[in-house]
Image (cartoon, rainbow, N blue to C red):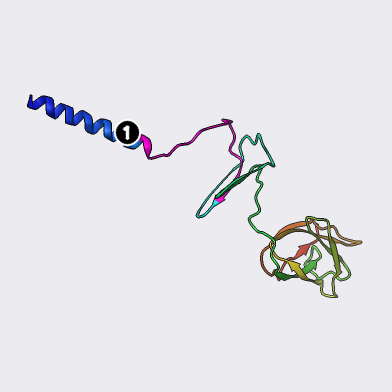
Amino acid sequence: MQNRKILTAFLALIFLNLTIQAQTGGGFTITQSVIAGGGQNAGGTFSIAGTIGQPVAGSALTGSPFAVTSGFWNFAPLAPTAASVTISGRVLTAKGSGLMRAIVSISDGSGELRSVITASSGFYRFENVRAGETYIFEVRSKKYQFAPQVVSVIEEITELNFTAAQ
């Protein structure tokens, strides 16, 4: 009789423990299952990002307190701010001399284009550049060729230099 009470108590504890463990995750339903892992999800102190599969590339899914934006590397780590910065540097020949009268251009994601002409020592300067965006910098010269540079601007840049190709 004693053994039966112990066995009954032991089974009751196991059953109770299983019931408690099954209830700790809360109720949820999986409505869609795909092999994918794209997008970014953030809320509070949590975030997740991925790029494999992408069956819903470019879509936005929201539901408080989380939101998911899917797509191939579809995230904006640097949101545009009201702050503006100065970008400056030099345009140099292949031998390292400053190149005057070269045209340095900057274009943003919306296609806005600004240009300046280099001074006698090859220096140039752009003021009021919006921080938090990505720009394409290009140099044009009658004598030399330059590779464009893609730059994500988060702060002032004082040495964005260009050297002519050999």
Total numbered circles? 1
Q: Is residue 129 magenta?
A: no
Q: Which residue is mark 1?
A: 19
Question: Where does the magenta region start and end?
Answer: 22-42
Looking at the magenta stretch, what is its main secondary structure? loop
Residue at x-position 59% and y-position 35%: 36
Q: Nearer the viewer, residue 138 or 52?
A: 52
Image coordinates of residue 96 in percent, x first then y, are 77, 67
> In the image as oriented, which residue stretches furthest toward the left?
2
How far across and down, in percent of the image, does residue 141 sit?
88, 62
Q: Is residue 81 left or right of residue 64?
A: right
Residue 29 screen position, x and y as percent = 50, 33
Q: Secondary structure at mark 1?
A: helix
Q: Is residue 142 left or right of residue 31?
A: right
Residue drawn at point x = 32 percent, y = 33 percent: 19
Q: Quadrant of the N terminus?
A: top left
Q: Amino acid at mark 1?
A: Thr
**Where, by quadrant of the figure, is residue 134 drawn?**
bottom right
